[in-house]
Image: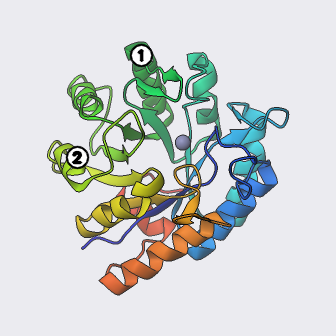
């Protein structure tokens, strides 16, 4: 089976220290946590950054740079920068696409709108077309985030319309309270829609974290873990670092007989340009 790409999602945009006391917030903390994940075996880090005043997500290029630069200097991690801004606050399209200026290997592409908390995370066709065009121009691979089957259909249509280029790379997000549940049956329904040459990774939110990771492991997909998606290492026990989640997947994968991909190998698996 193909080597396993582990992505670490370091912080997200919404969780603050009052609910997640160990979550990285400052650029230094985010970079440090990403380096620990790289040491533990992650090949990709998915990066959001936080506004120093509010502690919530920001698309400020300057703050992104404070994380991206040390990671470029000190690691060979592949970077997947977010274009979601703050889900529910629905920032302007140009603001959401700002991080593409830093030349990441990948950027998130949320393939449709969905309720989140008390609001809606809006990804209009206008946003999706602008994001796809901009990523294509800059040679950034879209990581197609899929919360339900309609988003899968959207991506396949955008491929047919040549907004998205094959091979596609999907990131399935299961277990938000508003999208596909984190169950094997729900995942298999999405899985059936995958084009043959696509690559994919999976995220289980909250208590779906480990079960969905196992679906990725056994079906030949890849796995994302980290505090953006889940803050508990086990029931009632907070994870103290993102690296703990990466270490656990590396251990399980090894026992299962699946090797972990280095960033260089991940680059090849995903068909990314050489550095
Ligand atoms: Zn994210």
Res. 169 visible in picture: yes
31 shown above or below 103? below
Residue drawn at 53 percent across, 69 percent down: 246
Name the residue that disc number 1 marks.
Answer: 124
Q: Which mark is residue 186?
A: 2
* Residue 165 percent across, percent down from the top left: 30, 36
* Residue 100 percent across, percent down from the top left: 58, 34
Identify the element where label 1 is drawn. Answer: loop
For this rendering, which residue is in front, 255 or 75? Answer: 255
Q: Are marks 2 and 1 in contact (CB under 8 Å)?
A: no
Residue drawn at 37 percent across, 39 percent down: 144
Q: Which mark is residue 16?
A: none
Ligand 1, seen in the image, is in the quarter at top right
Seen in the image, is 166 located left or right of residue 31? left
121 shown above or below 24? above
* Residue 36 percent across, percent down from the top left: 67, 69
Specify which label sits upstream in the sequence, 2 or 1.
1
Residue drawn at 69 percent across, 52 percent down: 20
Identify the element where label 2 is drawn. Answer: helix
């Amino acid at each position: 089976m193909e080597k396993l790409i582990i992505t670490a999602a370091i912080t997200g945009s919404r969780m603050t220290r009052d609910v997640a006391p160990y979550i990285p917030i400052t650029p230094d903390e985010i970079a440090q946590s990403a380096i620990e994940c790289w040491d533990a075996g992650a090949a990709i880090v998915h990066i959001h950054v936080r506004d120093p005043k509010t502690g919530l997500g920001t698309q400020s290029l300057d703050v992104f740079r404070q994380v991206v630069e040390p990671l470029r200097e000190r690691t060979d991690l592949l970077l997947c920068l977010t274009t979601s801004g703050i889900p529910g606050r629905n920032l302007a399209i140009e603001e959401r696409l700002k991080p593409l200026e830093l030349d990441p290997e990948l950027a998130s592409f949320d393939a449709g709108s969905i309720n989140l908390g008390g609001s809606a995370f809006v990804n209009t066709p206008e946003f999706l077309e602008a994001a796809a065009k901009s990523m294509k121009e800059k040679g950034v691979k879209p990581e197609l985030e899929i919360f339900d089957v309609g988003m899968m259909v959207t991506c396949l249509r955008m491929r047919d319309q040549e907004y998205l280029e094959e091979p596609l790379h999907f990131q399935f997000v299961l277990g938000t309270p508003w999208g596909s549940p984190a169950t094997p049956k729900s995942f298999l329904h999405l899985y059936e829609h995958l084009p043959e040459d696509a690559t994919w990774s999976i995220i289980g939110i909250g208590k779906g974290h480990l079960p969905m990771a196992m679906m990725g492991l056994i079906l030949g997909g890849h796995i994302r873990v980290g505090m953006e998606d889940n803050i508990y290492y086990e029931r009632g026990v907070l994870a103290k670092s993102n690296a703990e989640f990466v270490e656990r997947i590396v251990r399980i994968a090894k026992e299962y007989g699946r090797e972990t991909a280095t960033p260089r190998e991940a680059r090849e698996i995903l068909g990314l340009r050489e550095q």
